[in-house]
Image: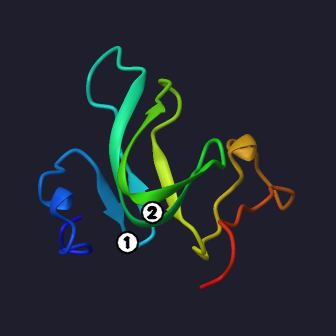
């Protein structure tokens, strides 16, 4: 993450989460039985994929991390077609697409 955010000191110490491109942040749960995940959000507004809740970075947040939901955040304004969480596992043209807010 320090390559994308060299001015944020915390990104140099984070070694258990990563950016997929510039706009998708993935923070895997690495310990068995862990039900919450503390993670760093770089400067931006980030939408939690599973809940739609917006978080503002930079800063640390702790979120629920149930076994069936990897912590995944999308930068606000991202233009990426992903199925809405409730549509995962469905096939066909009827699946909805989420957007994370105003276009940049």
Write down the quadrant of residue 95 in the picture: bottom right
Element type at marker 2?
strand
**Residue 32 screen position, x and y as percent:** 30, 17
* Residue 96 in the figure: left or right of residue 38: right
Residue at 19% of width from left, 74% of height from top? 7
User: 10 Å neighbourhood of mark 1: few (<14), some, or many (≥20)?
Assistant: few
Residue at 18% of width from left, 51% of height from top? 14
Q: CB under 8 Å between callouts 1 and 2?
A: yes
In the rendered image, which quarter contains the C terminus? bottom right
Work out how far the residue at label 1 is from the one at label 2, CA to CA, in angstroms. Answer: 6 Å
Write down the quadrant of residue 12 in the picture: bottom left
Asked whether the viewer can see residue 28, the reply is no
**Residue 17 screen position, x and y as percent:** 28, 49
Asked whether the viewer can see residue 96, the reply is yes
Q: Residue furthest top?
A: 33
Render colour scheme: rainbow
Q: Nearer the viewer, residue 61 or 99?
A: 61
Residue 40 vertical placement versus 64 (above, below)? below
In the rendered image, which quarter contains the N terminus? bottom left
User: 10 Å neighbourhood of mark 2: few (<14), some, or many (≥20)?
Assistant: some
Which residue is labeled 1 in the image? 21
Which residue is labeled 2 in the image? 24
């Amino acid at each position: 993450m320090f390559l994308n955010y060299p001015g944020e000191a915390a990104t140099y110490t984070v070694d258990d989460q990563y950016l997929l491109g510039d706009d998708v942040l993935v923070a895997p749960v690495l310990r068995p039985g862990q039900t919450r995940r503390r993670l760093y959000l770089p400067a931006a507004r980030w939408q939690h994929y599973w809940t739609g809740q917006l978080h503002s970075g930079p800063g640390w947040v702790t979120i629920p991390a149930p076994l069936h939901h990897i912590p995944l955040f999308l930068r606000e304004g991202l233009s990426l077609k992903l199925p809405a969480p409730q549509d995962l596992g469905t096939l066909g043209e009827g699946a909805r697409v989420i957007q994370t807010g105003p276009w940049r």
